[in-house]
Image (cartoon, helix red, strand yellow):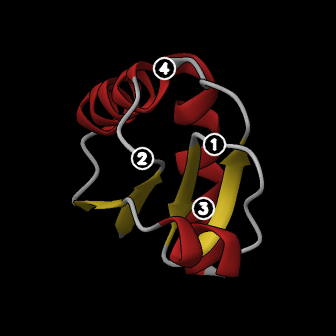
Amino acid sequence: MKIEILGIGCKRCQILEANAKAAAAALGIDCQFAKVTDPMEIVNRGVLVTPALAIDGKVKVSGRVASEEDLKRVFTEAIGAARS
């Protein structure tokens, strides 16, 4: 699973990244993290408000700092969808 944090590196982006890493670790997910900081790439992905989080190229969270608990649910749903 590839998890991307989309944003220019502001404090909110850093918190989202930390929450995502904590959620992935708590669930024992084998994943890779990447940052997307290019504003044009972010807009091309349909994100108008950052921070955002994408899983395997699909934006799952946008415009808010999701909590670790929220991200556990998002990751669990993504894993379930990938297995289907």
In percent of the image, x 55 and y 51: which residue is there?
53
Mark 1 is surrounded, within 10 Å at the Cα level, by few (under 14), some (14 to 19) or many (20 or more) other residues, namely many
- Asked whether disc 2 touches disc 1, contact meaning CB atoms under 8 Å apart, the reply is yes
Of badges 2 and 3, nearer the viewer stands 2
Task: Using the numbered discs, state the Cα–Cα distance from disc 2 to disc 3 in whole angstroms.
Answer: 25 Å
Question: Circle 3 sits on which residue?
Answer: 78
Percent x, y for residue 19?
39, 24
Question: Circle 4 sits on which residue?
Answer: 68
Question: Circle 1 sits on which residue?
Answer: 50
Q: How many labels does the image show?
A: 4
Horizontal placement of 78 versus 14: left or right? right
Quarter holding the C terminus is bottom right
Task: Using the numbered discs, state the Cα–Cα distance from disc 3 to disc 4 in whole angstroms.
Answer: 15 Å
The image quarter containing residue 44 is: bottom right
Q: Earlier in the sequence, mark 4 or mark 1?
A: 1
Horizontal placement of 67 versus 44: left or right? left
Of badges 4 and 1, nearer the viewer stands 1
Mark 3 is surrounded, within 10 Å at the Cα level, by few (under 14), some (14 to 19) or many (20 or more) other residues, namely some
- Asked whether disc 3 touches disc 4, contact meaning CB atoms under 8 Å apart, the reply is no
- Asked whether disc 3 touches disc 1, contact meaning CB atoms under 8 Å apart, the reply is no
In percent of the image, x 60 and y 24: which residue is there?
65
Percent x, y for residue 74?
63, 44
Circle 2 — which element?
loop
Mark 2 is surrounded, within 10 Å at the Cα level, by few (under 14), some (14 to 19) or many (20 or more) other residues, namely some
Quarter holding the N terminus is bottom left
